[in-house]
Image (cartoon, coloured by chain):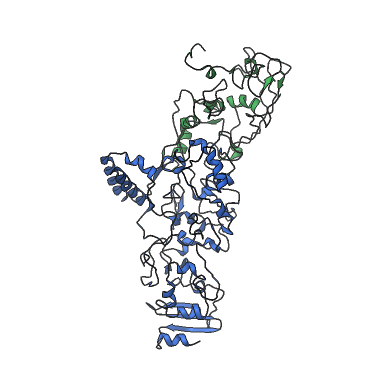
Chain colours: A blue, B green
Amino acid sequence: MKKSIGIFKARKKEEFIAGPVKQPAYTDTMTADPPVPVAAEKSHARHWLACALIAVLLSLILSLYPGPLYSTSLFESPHGDKSKVLKGCRSCHRGHGVLNTPMLAESKETFCFRCHGDSFTVQQTRSQGILSYSTETADISKEFLKPYRHPIEKTGIHRHDETLPETDAAAPRHAECSDCHHHHYVTSGNKAKGITGVTPQRALVETVQSEYELCFKCHSYSANLPADQTNKAELFNVGNPSYHPVIDRGKNSFVPSLIPPLNDTSIIQCSDCHNNDDPLGPRGPHASNNRYILTRNFSDLDGNENPYQYELCYGCHRRSSILGDESFRYHNLHITTAGASCRTCHNPHGSLFYSHLIDLDNLNIMPSDNGRLEFIDMGERAGECFLNCHNKDHDPAQYPVTLPVKEQKSRK
Amino acid sequence: MALFPLLSPAEVGIKNTKHNLSVSGPGPVSAVTEKQICKFCHTPHNASPAVPLWNHLLTEEQNYINYWSPTLKSYPSQGAAPPVDGFSRLCLSCHDGTVALGALVNREEEIETVPDVLTESIPGYLGTDLSGGHPISIVFDAALANLRNTDPNIMHLNWPINDPDVRLYPAQNGFGVQCTCCHDPHGGKGGAEAPPFWRKTTYDEVCLVCHDVLSTIGH
């Protein structure tokens, strides 16, 4: 009885911290609502029923407050849980620690891996009486051996009060463990708790409440954004004609390919696509064997269609629906017959100009013979394309046309 | 010592600690023939500095490498750290390895000790690079506590400090953190797990006097 009240109270708190209740994403995510750990619940469970009810009422009232309210303490983090990290302060800190560290027992590059590293190192930490034998940790260190990763190997230049998004174009880019995970306040439920975030409106918030706020710190308006990266806040902007629904639900209400429980009102997260390629490995956009730290394979080059080629997209968009032309009448023609990649016509994040994530800014797409490069949306399953691909002139190519779809497909 | 009849002998007095540098000392450093204990640090007359009747030659080192971390509020950069002063300077006169252990104010000749100066292999050696250790000679006052406590994402400080064992010592133009806040040079009461000369019985207790570890941050 007491335990269930505790869970009820905690769920309200997590909900109101994490924002509106989202549709469950296709894959596990960084800030999904997990089952609340039992250890944390024991302390909540000791409160009287009246206190619990008052707290719930207060949370409901406070959730109406528009400001960024949040609070946390070391006590809520597994790092402050003495049943897991057994020696308290001494588990991590030394009065006279390794040079140029904040009084740490090891240098910053390897420090986190004492517990979140390979089994040999972790066993040493356990035998030193620092990490409990009954606390499991994942090996994050081996993730960073993968070819596509957040480059933690670059020496940390993280400043707690750094201006983000970065305003200095010459500032070196960096990614450290503590850029995304607060050493004192990280929790299992919100891995970015206590880390400041950047909203789509470019404002700095005290703690990340939606996952994209964390990613936008470096992958949006940064003045030092690399030339091959784009401003993701701009692409996911809900003012655009189309965007993958990360910040808010998408513009298109007709998406027949979506695999349940996804639907046209779903909200997804960065980590639904950018995640570990090993489904059994630790979750999070640390590294992947797939380019762009993608969780499933995706080829952005034209080629022979098969389920593995566009595995990433097919994870949410049913392959049989796409190739069955349930949405765009000529998907099968373009993908199977012409061998085009999804990426040839679509931007995976958002489109500033067109609906349906159409993005014609591609070296493979030439203007039509009359010099036009444009897509015109003419309603559900209808539109016009002005372009030229592989010398096939679309000037315009209109759909639907008077001929039935089947006959179109047999043309080459 | 008569005031502490209930304390075990090990907790009282410097004789059985590593700071007993005389021939009877148990630590890694001991004199060759000198039997007096106190004179390595204290002298009743012509002491320099007068407080605390200091007798050991002070270190001349000025260029300590100071602590730095992204969340530090006491000073804005590693180079802007305050110079090491107060009691910390006294401690470092042996522990930075730059002055012979037997070099005294009131004696021309050094007292012979083995080894004669602290080196890296000896526990207790700190050297001149203090970047991995707690910032010292920083002023700890209501203003600092307020600076930290109004930042929503970092651990808070307790203020005022009212502990019988861990106190603030003169630093810069006020009171602040020196070596002696955490370490009692005459002997501590730390248990087996605690650092040497510790002012409390366990490691964490000293930290918790100033650092509000369990506080709720944010608002």
Q: Is residue A26 visible?
A: yes
Q: Position of residue A280 (x, y in %)?
A: 48, 57
Q: How many marks?
A: 0
Horizontal side, residue A5 vs residue B75: left or right: left
Residue most extreme to the right: B109
Residue most extreme to the top: B2
Residue placed at 48% from the left, 81% from the top?
A333
Q: Is residue A221 visible?
A: no
What is the quadrant of residue A122 in the picture?
A: top right
Q: Position of residue B121 (x, y in %)?
A: 67, 31
Front position in the image: A409 or A387: A409
Residue placed at 56% from the left, 41% from the top?
A124
| Quarter of the image that includes the N terminus of chain A | top left
Q: Position of residue A394 (x, y in %)?
A: 49, 83
Front position in the image: B3 or B181: B3
Above or below, comparing residue B134 to residue A384 in the picture: above
Front position in the image: B99 or A287: A287
What is the quadrant of residue B39 in the picture?
A: top right
Above or below, comparing residue A167 to residue A352 in the picture: above
Residue placed at 51% from the left, 17% from the top?
B8
Above or below, comparing residue A346 to residue A3 in the picture: below
